Amino acid sequence: MSTLKTFLLRVAASLLFLAVPVLGVWTFVTAEANGWWFPLNVSSYGGEIDYLFDLILWMVAITFVLTEGALVWLVWRFSRPDSSRAVFSHGSHKLEMIWTAVPALLLVFIAFSQMEAWSKVKIAMPDGTRPDEPYTVEKPLAEVYASQFDWRFRYPDAEGNFEGADVVESAYDFYVPVNTKVLVRLRSRDVLHSFFIPQFRLKQDAVPGMEIPVWFKAEETGSYELICAELCGWGHYKMAGKIHVLPEDEYEAWLANARTALYSNGSED
Ligand SMILES: [Cu+2]
């Protein structure tokens, strides 16, 4: 092959491999401007979750650029016509130690970095108690039932009881007050589901036979999507609801209205 042809082939091969990290990084750099990034966070702990996401993303990004850079350099360097023959190797103990130890250390670093956020979101309840202890101060606002393929929300009566005739039930639409720590009991009626509200950065599996406490504090009013994030059957795709974050007084009015409606025969007004 002519020297020029070989040279052009080497350039083409190296550029092809270079395109992968360039396109990869470009996608992330421009993601926010293109609307490909996260939906707006409206929950009190969402910022901490996003911080952890960014931390891990940076770790992955640096590793990605370094390894892709090495790959491009190797493609370029060893495609030279005068390159010596490849050496067959049975492995390097030292290298294996390094590529085992470095990811292990990074994982330990991630584990320690997420401890506080995890304990805040998943272990401690809003009143400081733990889910495996009976929570005394905070009463659950509602019970959330996931089932194939819908979401149901049950609000207790005025005394806080979930049994009896005065329990308000709502399907698909979940009403909660703004700027309030809301505690719910999550249950599944059949198979595994997952209670996922992207704008709250909240995702929790609903496990059959378990009652799982979940809490959040929405800081902005509005309607947000609630979706099932666990493939739960043929109708999984349509297992979506809405969470409506209302000002405190509007929430109270909605609940009072729903309670009155329980006893309405539809003939009034
Ligand atoms: Cu589901």
Image: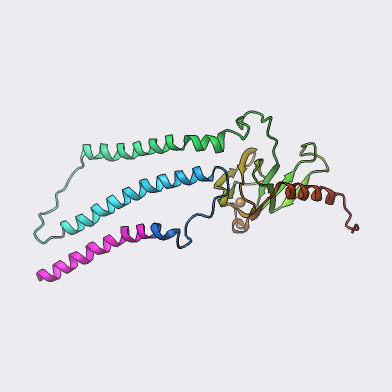
Quadrant for the N terminus in the image? bottom left
Q: Residue at x 23, y 57 (%)?
A: 72
Residue extending furthest toward the right: 267
Nearest to the observer: residue 250 or residue 144: 250
Residue plotted at (63% across, 38% down):
213
Residue 158 as seen in the image, left or right of residue 119: right
Quarter the C terminus occupies:
bottom right
Quadrant in which residue 217 is drawn: top right
The picture places residue 14, in percent across and down from the top left corner, at: 22, 62
Which percent across, then down, holds residue 92?
A: 20, 40
User: What secondary structure predominates along the stretch shown in magenta?
Assistant: helix
Marks counted in the figure total 0
Res. 143 visible in picture: yes
Q: Is residue 231 above or below residue 4?
A: above
Q: Is residue 9 magenta?
A: yes
Q: Residue 171: x and y, percent? A: 72, 53
In this rendering, the answer to whether 35 lies above or below 174 is below
* Foreground residue among 83 and 226: 226
Q: How is the image coloured?
A: rainbow
Task: Specify whether 69 is left or right of 114.
Answer: left
Residue 246 among magenta residues: no
Q: Is residue 210 visible?
A: no
Rendering quarter of residue 120: top right
Per the rendered image, the range of residues in magenta is 1-26
| x and y percentages locating residue 48 in the rendered image | 50, 42
At x 19% / y 65%, what residue is drawn? Answer: 11
